[in-house]
Amino acid sequence: MDEEKLLDRILDRDNLNRAFKQVKRNKGAAGVDGMTVEELGADMALNKEEMIAQIRQRTYQPQPVRR
């Protein structure tokens, strides 16, 4: 599978929604950035399309990890 097809599968909206629901169902803990599942859901609702576009354009810059 080439890189673009793999990226398409990863960034597929149904796949992202399934992944989020799985984390929520498992009561996933906050990540290294301290963001809770609830905060992630709200953030994704506002920023998912922009983040997907940035990842596809190779311009996405994740926030630095808080220590």
Image: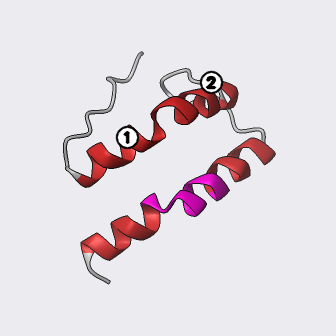
- Residue 20 point in image, percent of width and height: 64, 47
Q: Within 10 Å of the Cα at label 1, are there few (<14), some (14-19), or many (20+) other Cα atoms?
A: some
Q: Please, what secondary structure does the residue beneath circle 2 have?
A: helix
User: Would residue 36 appear left or right of 7 to someone viewing this image?
Assistant: right
Q: Badges 2 and 1: C-beta atoms under 8 Å apart?
A: no
User: Would residue 31 appear left or right of 55 to someone viewing this image?
Assistant: right
Determine whether 13 is above or below 62 in the image: below
Main secondary structure along the magenta-highlighted residues: helix
- In magenta segment, residue 40: no
Determine whether 12 is above or below 32 in the image: below
Q: Toward which corner of the image does residue 15 lie, by quadrant?
A: bottom right
Quadrant showing the N terminus: bottom left
Q: Residue furthest top?
A: 67
Residue for badge 2: 39
The kind of residue tagged 2 is Glu
- Residue 10 point in image, percent of width and height: 45, 63
- In magenta segment, residue 14: yes
Quadrant showing the C terminus: top left
User: Would residue 10 appear left or right of 55 to someone viewing this image?
Assistant: right
- Residue 47 point in image, percent of width and height: 45, 33
Residue for badge 1: 51
- Please tell me how many numbered marks the rendered image carries: 2
Magenta residues, start to end: 11-18
For the point 35% across and 65% down, the residue is: 7
Q: Within 10 Å of the Cα at label 2, are there few (<14), some (14-19), or many (20+) other Cα atoms?
A: few
Determine whether 49 is above or below 1 in the image: above
